[in-house]
Amino acid sequence: MIHAMHKITKWALWTQQHSPLLLQVTTTNPLESYHSACHKIIALDEKKHSDSEYVSFEFCTKNISAIGVDHVILHEIYKFPFPVQQMLVNEFNAVQGRIKKGKPTPGLISLNCN
């Protein structure tokens, strides 16, 4: 909160120094409106920052749930970030689908992962 108040103070000082209109106005209504707008911008900035921290946390810690994937394979998949886990499970399911249809695996020599 102190950081946000510091931003508001800096913006208010800048406005007072650089806006001839505000220096000529005898009422504080424009400044109060500007101050209110600053509060809204700062609140939005803090929300966006909080949202980005949450997404970053989930990117690194979230694990995919996949039916039909062996737990040993899933354990290895969990070593990757969540979006990569999704891609790997999709590829795993595509290969399994080919095998069930009797098609060869595309360019694979074995089903082992090193």
Image: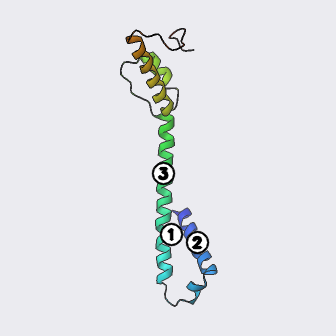
Give the residue displayed 50% in from the left and 59% down from the top: 45
| N-term-proximal mark, 3 vs 2 | 2
Q: Amino acid at mark 2?
A: Trp
Give the residue displayed 38% in from the left and 24% down from the top: 66
Mark 1 closeness class: few <14, some 14–19, many ≥20 residues within 10 Å: some
Which residue is denoted by mark 3 in the rendering? 50
| N-term-proximal mark, 3 vs 1 | 1
Cα distance between the residues tagged 1 and 2: 8 Å
Mark 1 vs 2: CB contact within 8 A: yes
Give the residue displayed 42% in from the left and 14% down from the top: 98
Name the residue furthest right: 17
Give the residue displayed 61% in from the left and 85% down from the top: 20
Which of these two is toward me, 32 or 102? Answer: 102
Disc marking residue 38 = 1
Where is residue 63? Give x, y as percent: 44, 30
Mark 3 closeness class: few <14, some 14–19, many ≥20 residues within 10 Å: few
Where is residue 1? Give x, y as percent: 51, 62
Which residue is denoted by mark 2 in the rendering? 11
> Mark 1: which secondary structure?
helix
In the figure, is residue 45 to the left or right of 16? left
The image shows residue 34, relative to residue 88, as above or below, that is: below
Disc marking residue 101 = none
Q: Amino acid at mark 1?
A: Cys
The image shows residue 100, relative to residue 59, as above or below, that is: above
Cα distance between the residues tagged 3 and 1: 18 Å
| N-term-proximal mark, 1 vs 2 | 2
